[in-house]
Amino acid sequence: MTDRGTSAEKPRVGLFVTCLVDLYRPSVGFAAIKLLKQAGCEVDVPQLQTCCGQPAYNSGDDEHTRALALQVLQAFEDYDYVVAPSGSCLGMIRCHYPDLFAQHELLARFQALSAKSHELISFLVDVLGIDQIKASYTGQVTYHDSCSGLRELGISAQPRQLLAGVDGLSLTELEGREVCCGFGGTFCVKYPEISGRMAADKVAAAAATGADTLLAGDMGCLLNLAGKMRREGVDTRVYHIAEVLADMADAESIGEGKA
């Protein structure tokens, strides 16, 4: 991957870090910054940003969701692109914000925000046209497709395309790779028994591949599955795909010491 040009030509990207990355796995945010800068982008992390509003939205609290959306608009409106290492949060911004303001004078501004907002891996592949990233990772991996990224944003081939170019990495697909892991944001709180069974099925499918590493593009899924693995004594390493592509995967995988 090469630099795309001089500073004047660089697209200005506002990185939406996400709550889970900020609180549980900051290394994913740093990996995203590294990948974007290597791709020739100028990257800022607006301090005004907070939550995208998805938990409130999923609970039917449109009033507080709109308040959070307005803060996102204020923080990111002036950037060329909004990028996040999460299909879940970007699905909220890209797909649901315009609906929330459908009858509002700010609709056009939210539509413009939606149009320039992208999940990290999709942005690298579909917007910047990157087909390979120089990275190395020694291991047999399997990949879980998060629901929001897959169903709302059409993210499936893009991560696999970039992983195919990582030296030392071998990908084995797990059975039911497009099935929910059971996290589902507030779903895991409202329906813990069903969620737990879904997570157990996903962990079993990952183990059946023989892979020593599980990758995905959403921290919610990764924390859910890593926690389930640790409780069941499964020693599979768990990383966000950005950490592997940025050569920032280290000895401590997601969930270690936190189960």
Image (cartoon, rainbow, N blue to C red):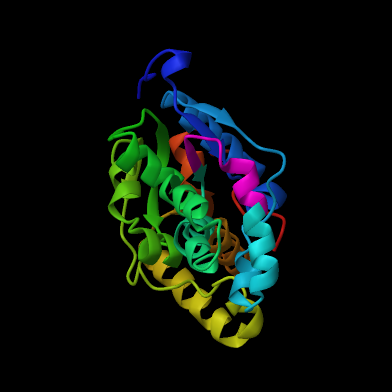
**Which part of the image, by quadrant, shows the C terminus?**
bottom right
Q: Is residue 101 magenta?
A: no
**In the image, what residue occupies the spot 34% across and 65% down?**
174
Asked if 119 appears above or below 196 in the picture, the reply is: above
Whether residue 19 is visible, yes or no, is no
Measured as percent of width and height from the top left, residue 90 is found at 49, 55
Q: Nearer the viewer, residue 48 or 70?
A: 70
Q: Quadrant of residue 5?
A: top left
Residue pictured at 41% horizontal, 27% vertical: 39
Image quadrant in which you'd find residue 11 = top left
Question: At which x and y percent is residue 154?
Answer: 33, 59
What residue do we see at 44% from left, 47% from top? Answer: 118
Q: In this rendering, would 258 be left or right of 62? A: right
The residue positioned 47% from the left and 60% from the top of the image is 91
Where's the N terminus, which quadrant? top left
Viewer-closest of 222 and 259: 222
Residue 233 sits above or below residue 256 on the image: below
Residue 76 falls inside the magenta stretch = yes
Residue 124 position by quadrant: top left
Asked whether residue 141 is in view, the answer is yes
| Chain part drawn in magenta | 71-82
- Percent from the top left, x then y, of residue 121? 40, 44
